Image: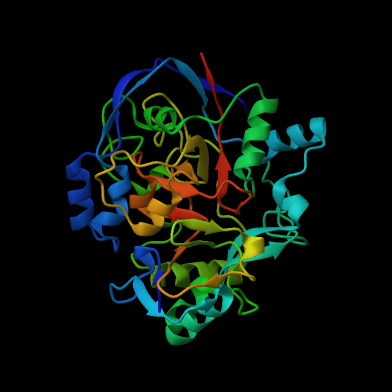
Amino acid sequence: MVKIVLPGVWAEGGKSTFDTEAGPLPEVVKRFVAENPAYRRRLLGPDQEPAGYLNVCIDDVLVPRQARAATVVADGSTVTIIPPMAGG
Amino acid sequence: MGQMVYIPGGRFLQGSPEWMLALLDQADQPFGRQWFADETPPVARELEPYLIDRYPVTVGDFRRFVRETGYRTEAERRGYSLVYGRAGWQELPGAHWDASGGPGVRIDGYDDHPVVHVSWGDATAYARWAGKRLPTEAEWELAARGPEFRVWPWGDEWSSANANTTELHVDAVQTYGDWQAWWAQMCDRDGVVPRSTPVGAFSDRGDSPYGCADMAGNVYEWTGTVSHQYAETTECDPTVRMAFGRYRVIRGGSWMNLRYQVRCSERMHGDPTGWATFAHGFRCAKSA
């Protein structure tokens, strides 16, 4: 399993940390959205792919936008979604 | 524009006192205490005298820069920028500083509005051309509220008539759902265009103690400061913590926000690697 961490202000029902299955990064995000459709608008673009403007850290490492398609999230990792404007 | 205000510098406490977080906790707003924790604890700063723009840089100012230098913004080079449409944030092809609602959306009379769709790099390039620089976060906050703490540039009492926030445009917006409903109406009526106002439209009543305008609302403003925690012991939202060391501080909130996001000590953190939106602008500073 991998842990998904979302901004606290996105939390539906007070929860902003979730578990989902490991795998290729885009698939991890899309699987998470399928399991938690309330976050579709936040995480996917109009093409239903992960929104490119959102930054993604796996553990403490920022994954560059151009490298996300080829990135695999290993079991036990934490995926943190960082909006281009954080906080506020 | 280009009018600058002299700030004498000096010592002050940057950030919010604990009572501000307690007040936010009790206020009719949806965010928890941890969300605002990055603005605490107050930290002592000592600043040399400096000058800061009275107004955000306008579309007209930016046009002069582009005409003189041939500069192309990152949004123009990339071919898109972010707008908030009916379905949320979207990368809109053709959106840039002179087409803030995208191609084919003609907006007349915007030359005295703050320029938007400018990345941190674009703002830095403009400032260098103007013989200035972006203000540091500390310079921005001192210019916004003076050496004594105050919630908004004009004082501690909120007035929706003093700043361009969502509350200027509509009453009774408290939740994200309310906001989305208002924004959907605006999109239907006018298209996806910024709800900015001409710079200085709220002067003098909305000005800071030093006479700086639009420091609450209108457009978000880039600063030159790398995002960081005021104290290692502060527990911040994990996604905000990840922005520290990577993002640049953004101040002032915008027309997209409610009153609590346009406070003088409120901090946001923006991706400086080319990201721009139709609500983000900047002002410049220079050492005196």
Task: Classify residue B175 as left or right of residue B148.
Answer: right
Task: Estimate the x, y position of residue A18 in percent, counting from the top left.
Answer: 36, 76
Task: Estimate the x, y position of residue B36 in percent, counting from the top left.
Answer: 30, 51
Residue that appears at 22% across and 45% down: B20
Residue B178 falls in which quadrant of the image? bottom left
How is the model colour-coded? rainbow
Residue that appears at 51% across and 41% down: B221
Which residue is at the far front? A75
Residue B13 falls in which quadrant of the image? top left
B61, above or below A31, in the image: above
Task: Estimate the x, y position of residue A10 in percent, counting from the top left.
Answer: 39, 68
Residue B7 falls in which quadrant of the image? top left
Task: Estimate the x, y position of residue B269 in percent, counting from the top left.
Answer: 46, 48
Task: Classify residue B181 as left or right of residue B44.
Answer: right
Q: Which of B214 and B83 is in front in this view?
A: B83
B206, above or below B239, in the image: above
- Image quadrant containing the N terminus of chain B: top right
A51, above or below B79, in the image: below
Task: Classify residue A37 as left or right of residue B80.
Answer: left
B11, above or below B96, in the image: above
Is any part of residue B260 visible from this angle?
Answer: yes
Is any part of residue B108 visible from this angle?
Answer: no
Residue that appears at 74% across and 55% down: B78
Q: Tag count in the figure?
A: 0
Q: Nearer the viewer, residue B231 or A71?
A: A71
